[in-house]
Image (cartoon, rainbow, N blue to C red):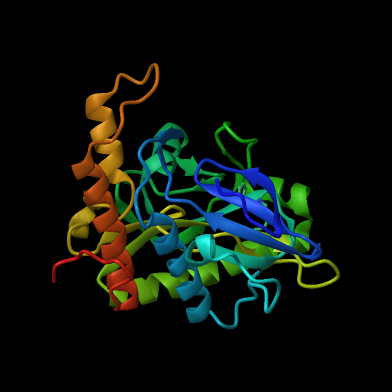
C-alpha cells in the first residue's frame, strides 16, 4: 500500500486498496495492486504489472459496454503518478451486498455445489453434468458478500429479493446476464470462453439503483478459458491464477505461512495475464514480454 498525497486510505482487500480523495466526498480511488492470492491466502512476491493489466482490462470492458451505466468518474482530482496506471477514480455508490455471479459453464465451487445438491444458488440444473460442461443458457447464481476472510455464500434469488428488494434484484439479474452474454460473445471472437464472471453493483444516490462497479471482467473476477483447449467438455486452462494454484498445491501442505513463489512461476503468471489482455484487446500492453 502506498501513501498517496491528497488521498486518505480507507480499506485494503487482499489485492486492492481503496482511498478517498480529500475534499471530494462523492468519489473513491480504487487501486489494484500487483499482489496475488490463491486459496484465499496472500502470497509473495507480487506479480509485476498485474494491477495495471487488470485495471486496463476493466477500462477496456467499460469502453466496450458504453450503454451499461458504470461507476467511472467523469472528472475529479489528479491521480498520483505512482498509481495512475493501476487506479480508477469512481463515483461513490451504495454497494449492494450481493456478488452477481453468472455462469456459462459449471466448474469450481459451482460444480461442487451442483454435485452435492443438483443446483447452484437454488438454480436446478440437468442431471449428469461434468466439471467444465457448458450450460445451455447462462445462469445467475448470486452470492452473499461475506466479511473479509470469510467465504461468500451462494444464495437463491429469493434471498436477493429480501436483501435489495424485488425491483433491484431483477435489475441486478437482468443486467448481469445481459453483460455476460455480450462479453462472452466478444471473448469468443478472441478464441476465449468466458466460463463465469462476478459483477458488483451499487446504487447512485438519488439515481440509477444498479450501476456496474468494481473491477469488471478481469481474470481475477472471471474464468477465461482458451476455447480450443476447453472444447469437448474438459475443464479449461485458465488465464488466471491457475499456475499459482497448481504450484502452491504441489509445494505447500496448507498450514503455516506459504512458501514464496519462485521467479519462474511469477514470470509465467505475469505472461499469462498479459496474453489475456493482448488476445482480448488486440494490443500488447506496456511492458509486454510476450514473444509473438
Ligand atoms: C467499494 N469495494 C471493494 C474492498 C478495495 C476495494 N463505486 C464504489 N462506491 C462505493 N464503494 C465501492 C465502490 C466500488 N467499486 C468497492 N468496497 C467498496 C474493495 C477493499 C479494498 F480496494
Image quadrant assignment for residue 26: bottom right
Residue farthest to the front, as pictured: 5
Image quadrant assignment for residue 93: bottom right
Residue farthest to the left, as pictured: 292
Does 247 sit above or below residue 47? above
Does 240 sit above or below residue 6? above
The residue under the point 66% across, 67% down is 90
Residue 14 visible at all: yes
Horizontal arrangement in the rendering, residue 287 relative to residue 14 (left or right)? left
Horizontal arrangement in the rendering, residue 173 relative to residue 95 (left or right)? left
Query: Residue 112 in the image: x percent, y percent?
Result: 40, 36
The residue under the point 47% across, 35% down is 117
The residue under the point 66% across, 69% down is 71
The residue under the point 61% across, 67% down is 79
Residue 103 visible at all: no
Q: Nearer the viewer, residue 55 or 1?
A: 1
Residue farthest to the bottom, as pictured: 67
Query: Residue 259 in the image: x percent, y percent?
Result: 31, 26
Q: Nearer the viewer, residue 276 or 172?
A: 276
Query: Residue 115 in the image: x percent, y percent?
Result: 39, 35
Query: Residue 160 in the image: x percent, y percent?
Result: 69, 50
Q: Quadrant of the N terminus?
A: top right
Does 6 sit above or below residue 18? below
> How many numbered marks does the figure carry?
0
Q: Quadrant of the C terminus?
A: bottom left
Horizontal arrangement in the rendering, residue 176 relative to residue 202 (left or right)? left
Amino acid at each position: 500500500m502506498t501513501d498517496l498525497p491528497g488521498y486518505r486510505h480507507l480499506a485494503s482487500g487482499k489485492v486492492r486498496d481503496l482511498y478517498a480523495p480529500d475534499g471530494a466526498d462523492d468519489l473513491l480511488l480504487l487501486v489494484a495492486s500487483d499482489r496475488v492470492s490463491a486459496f484465499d491466502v496472500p502470497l509473495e512476491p507480487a506479480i509485476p504489472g498485474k494491477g495495471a493489466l487488470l485495471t486496463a482490462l476493466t477500462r477496456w470492458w467499460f469502453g466496450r459496454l458504453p450503454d451499461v451505466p458504470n461507476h467511472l468518474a467523469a472528472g475529479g482530482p489528479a491521480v498520483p503518478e505512482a498509481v495512475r496506471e493501476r487506479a480508477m477514480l469512481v463515483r461513490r455508490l451504495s454497494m449492494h451486498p450481493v456478488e452477481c455471479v453468472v455462469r456459462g459453464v459449471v466448474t469450481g465451487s459451482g460444480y461442487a455445489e451442483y454435485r452435492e445438491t443438483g443446483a447452484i444458488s437454488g438454480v436446478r440444473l440437468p442431471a449428469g453434468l461434468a466439471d467444465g460442461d457448458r450450460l445451455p443458457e447462462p445462469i445467475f447464481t448470486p452470492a452473499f458478500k461475506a466479511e473479509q476472510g470469510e467465504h461468500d455464500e451462494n444464495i437463491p434469488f429469493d434471498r436477493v429479493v429480501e436483501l435489495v428488494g424485488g425491483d433491484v434484484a431483477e435489475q441486478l439479474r437482468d443486467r448481469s446476464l445481459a453483460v455476460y452474454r455480450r462479453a462472452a460473445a466478444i471473448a469468443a471472437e478472441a478464441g476465449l470462453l468466458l466460463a463465469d464472471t462476478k459483477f458488483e453493483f451499487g446504487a447512485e444516490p438519488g439515481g440509477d439503483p444498479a450501476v456496474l462497479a468494481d473491477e469488471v471482467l478481469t481474470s481475477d473476477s472471471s474464468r477465461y478459458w482458451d476455447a480450443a483447449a476447453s472444447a469437448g467438455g474438459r475443464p479449461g486452462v485458465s488465464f488466471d491464477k491457475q499456475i499459482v494454484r497448481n504450484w502452491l498445491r504441489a509445494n505447500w501442505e496448507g498450514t503455516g505461512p506459504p512458501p514464496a513463489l519462485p521467479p519462474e512461476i511469477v514470470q509465467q503468471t505475469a505472461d499469462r495475464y498479459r496474453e489475456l489482455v493482448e488476445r482480448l484487446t488486440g494490443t500488447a500492453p506496456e511492458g509486454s514480454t510476450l514473444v509473438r
